Amino acid sequence: MTETKRYSLVTPTLDTPFHIDFEWWRQNDHEWRVHLRSSLCPEHQEKFADVLGDDKVDWIDPETAEVQQVDGLQNILIRHCAQTEDFITGRTSIVEAIFRTFLANGNLHMTPRELGERLNRPATTILRTVSGVRVYKGIRPCPEC
């Protein structure tokens, strides 16, 4: 039997931590890998052009030294492409900028206040964007935080 994550019905605030819930994304958007691939830098778009599956790679947590199996596409996106200076620009939509900020941050949880500071956008706008009924790009409150 598959365990279903339950999310709190408490209304998120400016101090509620959010993250990209990749499991939610896998269950609700069958094209999620296409979007990830489109977010790659040009060098890696070419390298991943023929990759169809969700190959896993070993990743070592720099703080705990714990080895985890992670999605190879996600890993290269977070560890390399998201670190390039043109990953987020002034022309990036707010939803995409929030999504890319999480990628650049290694998907560590962030509050709307922190996202607002990083993106130079009003925290209240970010909160309204990510706390509505519709879930954008798997951005959800972080239940374990």
Image (cartoon, grey):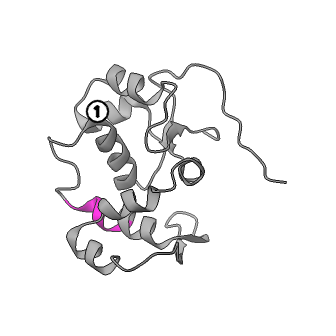
Write the residue at 40% across / 22% down.
128
Q: Is residue 122 left or right of residue 7?
A: left
Judged from this view, the residue extending furthest toward the front is 30
Judged from this view, the residue extending furthest toward the right is 1
Residue bearing the label numbered 1: 117
Q: Position of residue 66 (x, y in %)?
A: 61, 70
Assess whether residue 26 is covered by the magenta stretch. no
Q: Is residue 86 left or right of residue 76?
A: left
Write the residue at 57% across / 39% down.
142
Whether 49 is drawn above or below 15: the answer is below
Whether 127 is drawn above or below 115: the answer is above
Which of the pair 21/63 is nearer the observer? 21
- First to last magenta residue range: 79-84
Whether 17 is drawn above or below 124: the answer is below
Q: Position of residue 41 (x, y in %)?
A: 24, 67
Image mark count: 1
Which of the pair 75/47 is nearer the observer? 47
Q: Which quadrant is the C terminus positioned in?
A: top right
Q: Is residue 43 left or right of residue 101?
A: left
Q: Position of residue 89 (x, y in %)?
A: 16, 46
